[in-house]
Amino acid sequence: MTWSAAEIWALGTKAARGAGAPPAQAARFGQVAPHHLMTGRDATLLGAALDALPDGPVLSFPLAVDRALIALAQEGEAVVQGVPFDALLQSYVDTLPFEVAVTQTGHDNRWVLKGNLAVPRAAVTLKRIVGCDALIDQMQRLAARTFVPECHVSRRSGAGAGLTDND
């Protein structure tokens, strides 16, 4: 089956919420997921990031990238330590709206962000996403955790369709 970027974005956001990520980090993960897959990067990195919640890259990568952007704006370059560099981190950087690049230094868990925050990033060509069925299954299971349980208690509190909704 093929998936659009929008479908992966929405499902990734819901899955991260279902796995315990705060709303802002879940939304950022949802944004990164389709780009990561469209560029042919390893889908298992996304699955592992979801498995690591409520800790791990879904929480640490956006914060590290944001700190790096602040340093980049102030100093023209940002050296970040303590956050592992991998293809998922590269996807987080690639989804920024600015023309920036990340390179790994010779040291473990140290990378450098360079670029110009005044130059917008070129538009990405969207394409259908295939070959990530195991990840989709995992994300659907996690997203289902965000659903309201089907029971009388939840219906009494307003969940589900009422009688007038079916008219």
Image: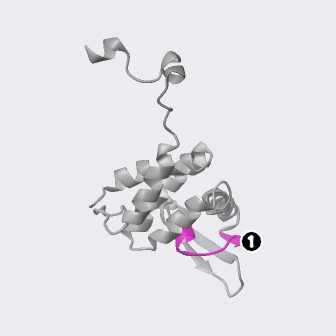
Left or right position of 60 against 158: right
The total number of labels drawn is: 1
Between 136 and 60, the one lying in front of the other is 136
Q: Position of residue 59 (x, y in %)?
A: 65, 56
Q: Residue at x 47, y 23 (%)?
A: 159
Which residue sits furthest right? 82
Q: Position of residue 79 (x, y in %)?
A: 70, 73
Q: Which region is colored magenta? A: 77-89
Q: Residue at x 62, y 58 (%)?
A: 62
Q: Is residue 165 above or below residue 20?
A: above
Q: Amino acid type of disc 1?
A: Gly
Q: Position of residue 163 (x, y in %)?
A: 34, 13
Residue 58 lies in quadrant: bottom right
Q: Secondary structure at mark 1?
A: loop
Residue 131 lies in quadrant: bottom left
Q: Position of residue 75 (x, y in %)?
A: 70, 66
Disc 1 crowd rating (10 Å Cα; few below 14, some 14-19, many 20+) is few
Q: Determine which residue is flagged by label 1.
A: 82
Q: Name the quadrant of the C terminus.
A: top left
Left or right position of 22 against 82: left
Between 35 and 129, the one lying in front of the other is 129
Q: Residue at x 31, y 66 (%)?
A: 130
Between 27 and 122, the one lying in front of the other is 27
